[in-house]
Image: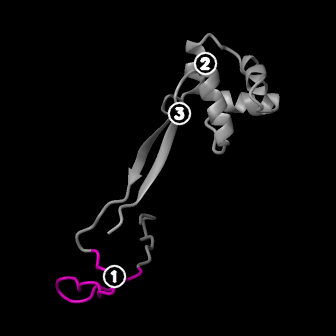
Amino acid sequence: MIEQRRIGYNWNLRQIMAQRNLWKSSDLMPLLKARGINLSESQVWRLVTGTPEKFTGRTLAALCDILECGVGDLFEPYVEMKAARTATAPRAGEKPPSPAGGPSLTHRIRLVEDDDGQT
């Protein structure tokens, strides 16, 4: 059975910039441009202040070069959630087991108020 996982990551760009005395996203722009990465002010600001969903390998490599760090310093993956395994799940091609006491039936019920207005 393949275990299912949801993966997240911590984006540490802002912290690493602070360790290098780079306090503003505008400080990063000329350093990126010098390495051939042409991003707008708003793109650099989002890169610094948020957690990017998409970025290129070149951008990541340029950030590592500028900040003299490794990819693992900027980008730390972690497991957000693992899918629970169940002992009663049928294997591929098997019929699900019958519950004890025969098949279970689902009934719909309707709640009605009594004379006192209570349910």
Local SS, label 2 = helix
Q: Looking at the picture, which amino acid does disc 3 mark?
A: Val
Decide: few, some or many residues near mark 3? Use Cα within 10 Å; few <14, some 14-19, many ≥20: few
Question: In what element is the residue under mark 1?
Answer: loop
Q: Which residue is mark 2?
A: 17
The magenta-colored residue range is 89-108
> How many labels, in total?
3
Q: Secondary structure at mark 3?
A: helix
Task: Name which residue lies at 54% across and 24% down.
Answer: 69
Q: Is residue 72 left or right of residue 50?
A: left
Q: Residue at x 49, y 44 (%)?
A: 8
| Residue drawn at point x = 74 percent, y = 26 percent | 32
Q: Amino acid at mark 1?
A: Ala
Quadrant of the rendering where the N terminus is positioned: bottom left
Residue denoted by label 3: 71
Which of the two discs, 1 and 3, labels the residue nearer the N terminus? Answer: 3
Q: Quadrant of residue 54?
A: top right
Q: Is residue 46 left or right of residue 75?
A: right
